[in-house]
Image (cartoon, rainbow, N blue to C red):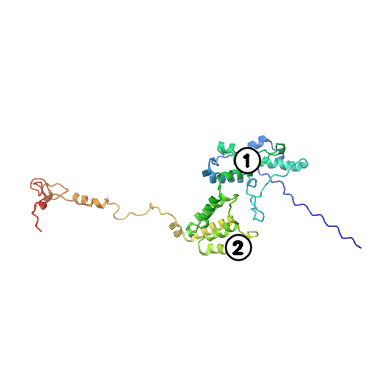
Amino acid sequence: HTPAPPVPPIPPPPVAPAPYNPVFANPTEVTMTDLKATLPSLAVIPTLRSSADWVNWESAVFRVVGALGLRGYICRIPLPGELRDPTSRVVLPPHYDFDSPPEVAEEYRVFWLHNDVVEHVVVGKLAPEIAASLPPKRTGPYDLPTRTARDTLTYLRSRFSVGSASTAESLKDGVVKLTCAPGTVPKFVESWRYAAFQLVGSPWDFTEYQKTQRFVDGLPNTSGWMVLKDRVRRWWQFHNSLEGADFTFDSLATKMLDIYTKWKSQNPQSTQNSQPRKPSASSEPSSDSSKPTTPSGDSSSNTRSTLKCTNCTMTGHTADRCWQKGGGMESGRDPARSKPRANV
């Protein structure tokens, strides 16, 4: 009897490598003085005081954090099976306890070092009353930090972004029903991007189908955009999700604008017609533009100004309407009215 070969052990799931530090050359040697010296300027970020400031504030925060190479600390965590954005690798705090080896402890320290830089960007331009309302940063055992920059952003989004299902549905309906002509594709894309940005990470986010199929449904029925619409339609005919698809909401938006750029170069006159018309400084004036114009009700004044009285030699009336001696109105009465009326 030959014994069965031993079953090979199941390998543990791969451990994500420690995040690359784009801010510091050697994270293990960074001190708090170095950290404060590398904090970015927040001049481009507006102050967040109310919901009216949310869109511009969040957009500016993402630009600054992205320029630092730390977008992974605040980007949205994708759902299971959702297509992951390779440009935004999610970075989460590593598990750390008494049994953690030194390399894990160092990874833990580096994570919170980077997180503090991102947290500085997120909370640096909050109104004082909003900053005071933030949840505490250290609530775990042994006073270890627990609130990440992503947690802070999620909390702020719940307060100042779309805060109810009815508001979210209204926002969705507004863009899902949009259609556009070739010349208004950029405005169409901008409206969709604004709505998607408002709802991302919220419980009422667009579905994959809405952000792709319903997105392209509003495009013009012309050659370039029809190819894009057909491509998305064919995908959803045979699939139930975007897993494995070669397009995303962002890539579709970029493609739409690329097609628009090509269409614009081929139809410059149509592009001008799609914009509000403005007076042209180079347009030639009409042949009568140099002549003074008066309202139609005052046309008689122009006629009177050309009249000249042969009785008193003054302008503005004729001899039969002249009040001077020898004129038709010398007696103070209109000669036309002084004639007797016929009895009817």
What is the secondary structure assignment of the residue under circle 2? Answer: helix
Q: Position of residue 19 (x, y in %)?
A: 69, 46
Q: Position of residue 198 (x, y in %)?
A: 56, 49
What is the secondary structure assignment of the residue under circle 1? Answer: helix
Q: Residue at x 71, y 42 (%)?
A: 108
State the quadrant of the C terminus. Answer: bottom left
Relative placement, left or right, of 93 versus 206 is right
Query: Do the residues bearing badges 1 and 2 touch, measured as CB atoms within 8 Å?
Result: no
Q: Looking at the picture, which amino acid does disc 2 mark? A: Trp
Visible residue check, residue 26 = no
Q: Position of residue 106 (x, y in %)?
A: 73, 41
| Residue designated by label 2 | 236
Visible residue check, residue 107 = yes
> Is 137 above or below relative to 173?
above
**Frontmost residue, 36 versus 4:** 4
**Residue lying at the far top of the rendered structure:** 33
Q: Residue at x 18, y 50 (%)?
A: 304
**Residue lying at the far right of the rendered structure:** 1
Q: Looking at the picture, which amino acid does disc 1 mark? A: Glu
Relative placement, left or right, of 206 versus 4 is left
> Is 171 above or below relative to 21?
below
Q: Residue at x 62, y 40 (%)?
A: 119
Q: How many marks?
A: 2
Q: Residue at x 64, y 40 (%)?
A: 117
> Is 174 above or below relative to 104?
below
Disc on res. 119? 1
